[in-house]
Amino acid sequence: RFLFVAFGGMASVRFVHDREFGRAARIELKDPTKLARAAGQLDNTRVGDGDVIEECVIRCRHHLGSIERRKLEEEAAAQARREAEAEAERRRRAEAAAAAAAAVAQRKKEAREREEAEA
């Protein structure tokens, strides 16, 4: 539990059998946004003093849960919407600029025609 204080503390721990290591703990942090950072910083860390706490090397892996996966998908969809809206705005501005340029060209043409007709 002390290892995870720097990451906001544990919400829960569940000990499970692991084929590779024999035993493992599934950890949930109070702040799930810190899971990836905790796993990255604690992976392959040696802990314990050999007296009170058994010495061991911690192996950490962060697996995305359904809530995290859904949040990432929602963020990606929101980013795609923002990009689509920005692209639509760029097109709208380009069309408005083209229309303004065409209107200026038309006025110049009409002014030349009037000058020619008066001459």
Image (cartoon, rainbow, N blue to C red):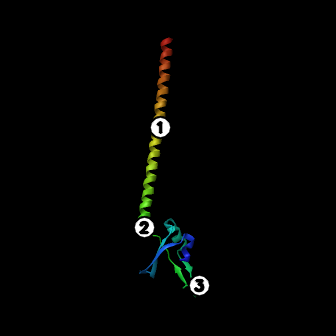
Q: Position of residue 26 (x, y in %)?
A: 45, 75
In the rendered image, which quarter is residue 91 located in? top left
Density class for disc 1 (Cα within 10 Å; few <14, some 14-19, many ≥20) is: few
Density class for disc 2 (Cα within 10 Å; few <14, some 14-19, many ≥20) is: few
Kind of residue sitting beneath label 1: Ala
Q: CA distance from mark 3 to mark 1?
A: 68 Å
Residue carrying label 3: 49
Kind of residue sitting beneath label 2: Gly
Q: Position of residue 13 (x, y in %)?
A: 47, 76
Q: Position of residue 59 (x, y in %)?
A: 50, 77
Q: Which is more foreground, mark 2 or mark 1?
A: 2
Q: CA distance from mark 2 to mark 1?
A: 43 Å
Choose between 107 and 61: the one closer to the eye. 61
The tag earlier along the polypeptide, 3 or 1, is 3
In the rendered image, which quarter is residue 5 located in? bottom right
Residue carrying label 2: 65
Residue carrying label 1: 94
